Amino acid sequence: MNKKIYNLCLVTDRDILNGKSLEKAVEDSILGGATMIQLREKNICENEFIEIGKKIKKITDKYNIPLLINDKVNVALEIDANGVHLGQDDMNPVKAREILGENKIIGLSISTLEEFKKSKEYPVDYYGVGPIYPTTSKSDAQKPMGLEGLKELSKLTDKPLMAIGGITEENTLEILENGGDGIAVISNILKDENVKRNTKKLKTIFEKKELMEKVAGKIEKLRDRNPLIYHLTNMVTINDCANVTLGIGASPLMSFSEEELEDIIKISEALVLNIGTMDKEMVSMAVKMGKMGNKYKKPIVFDPVGAGATKARKELVEKLMENIKFSVVKGNLAEIKSILNFESESKGVDSLDFSLEDEILKVGKEFYEKYNTVLCITGKNDYIFSKENIIKIQNGHENMGKVTGTGCMTGSLIGSFLGGGETDFLSGILGVGIMGIAGEMGQEESKYLGTGTLRVKIIDKISKMNSKIFLENIKLESI
Ligand SMILES: Nc1ncnc2c1ncn2[C@@H]1O[C@H](COP(=O)(O)OP(=O)(O)OP(=O)(O)O)[C@@H](O)[C@H]1O
Ligand SMILES: Cc1ncsc1CCO
Ligand SMILES: [Mg+2]
């Protein structure tokens, strides 16, 4: 059984729909990411319940989302729902299982540890646990069991625990961190017109947690592996790039020599290509490096510095994008737009207002569709695009724009993680995230000094980076 179905359950309540149609609310919630629907209608006769249930079942079937009926086993049976959710005073789960058979889901509400102990042997698939917090959605609710109660319960059973009662986007993460597997939500989803958006806000918390679990330990793994990262890069920031590569735990090698290109690529784990100070030699080297990198199956991160600023750069970038398969492309918005032949915004647009975010998302999606390559767009906020996901990172400080090469160094960090064996997407997140955090922390320590010190502090902070600092400081959301 896919445990994820127990992540995010909308529990319906027609009394708080405030004029919205129940069917639309259910559909919007599914579109926002609900993984299960529980039809919970009180004060309703059985015929009406069945009638509503049939309509809702059509919607949940369309999206292949399980529909559970609250309390009423015969309604579930009648509409062939995917299961029931039972309260302590409803039909005994043993009997419900007899009636419904092995393939239906049965959930049971638990308010206290005593209730759990009493019902431990029941044939149920998950427990609805709560209230964790005070709630207004259930008038007969017991005293909240709190996070401690949830945590204790999680140690006593392997079955999924879905927290219910007073769940919001503010407390979902702590529920997941204290033994909860999922949440069952009424008012926080149905409270207003924005059912889809309300659900999505909750959903992103699950996605973030999943991502954080993937990221944990990756910096230490990189330091352990110490991969060799070959750079063909610019003359302005080459030294800083070498230092951050060392600082994060990889080994840099910078070379401009065609004679040794193949030998170096063979022994490197990943390649960084940055065309910042391009010249005739770079044009020929960059193409050769890319082709050879592809031939030896080495991941390549490409920083198209200044793409579009001059005709020569535009031509080189076009040639590279056409002939070479990159693992990650990283650039600022102007550079990425130029790759797509979009008209570039005038310079100096630093602040990201909402319309600019829309534009970034459009550019990113189009880029991914065209090149099928993970893309990082840096700036005030950073965005990482992959096939299924868009991640927004909000670390960093505006003074980073006054230190040359923060983007170039980000490319080296991404290259380091690629070389350490991480996926293109995770490498993008880690590289961009670490640079943002280092910039933020470095700014704090250099604020009375200036950008020269900031540059050094960024390298310092990268050299001291670990998973704990990363997870504590990363401001990341999936959008
Ligand atoms: N205004 C800002 N606020 C917060 N962070 C910023 C800001 N500007 C840049 N950064 C951070 O700086 C890092 C580099 O991004 P930026 O877009 O400045 O690179 P770039 O233009 O390619 O730089 P360079 O070419 O000098 O290497 C990113 O991690 C980003 O988060
Ligand atoms: C300033 C500058 N000029 C060419 S490369 C470079 C470093 C930032 O990309
Ligand atoms: Mg740059």
Image (cartoon, rainbow, N blue to C red):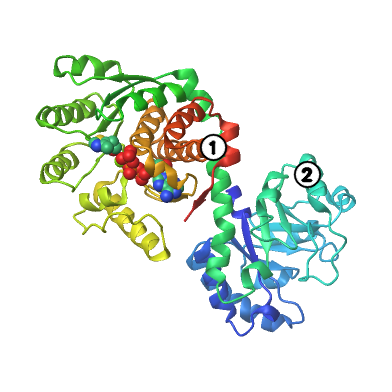
Percent across and percent down for residue 434 are 48, 36
Q: Is 70 or 104 nearer to us in this picture?
A: 70
Q: In which quarter of the image is ligand 2?
A: top left
Q: How crowded is mark 1: few (under 14 residues within 10 Å), some or many (20 or more)?
A: many
Residue at 70%, 72% in the rendered image: 40
Mark 2 and mark 1: span between their CA atoms?
Answer: 34 Å
Check disc 2: other Cα within 10 Å, few if <14, some if 14-19, many if 20+: some
Q: Earlier in the sequence, mark 2 or mark 1?
A: 2
Relative placement, left or right, of 321 versus 125 is: left
Disc number placed over residue 73 in the picture, else none = none
Specify whether 316 is left or right of 220: left
Residue 412 drawn at (x, y percent): 36, 30
Which residue type does callout 2 highlight?
Lys
Residue 87 left/right relative to 365: right
Image point (58%, 82%), residue name: 20
Q: In this view, does 114 lie above or below 60?
A: above
Please, what secondary structure does the residue beneath circle 2 have? helix
- Mark number displayed over residue 441: 1
Q: Is mark 1 on a helix, strand or loop?
A: helix
Task: Tell me if the residue at label 2 has its CB under 8 Å from ligand 1.
Answer: no
Q: Does the image show residue 326?
A: no
Where residue 334 appears, as percent x and y from the top left, is 27, 51
Q: Kindly indicate the quadrant of the structure image that contains residue 363.
A: bottom left
What residue would you read off at disc 2? Answer: 151
- Of tags 2 and 1, the one toward the viewer is 1
Name of the residue lying farthest toward the front:
448
Quarter of the image where one finds residue 188: bottom right
Residue type pointed to by label 1: Met
In the image, residue 357 lies at what x, y percent? Answer: 39, 60
State the count of labels.
Answer: 2
Residue at left offset 81%, top offset 65%: 91
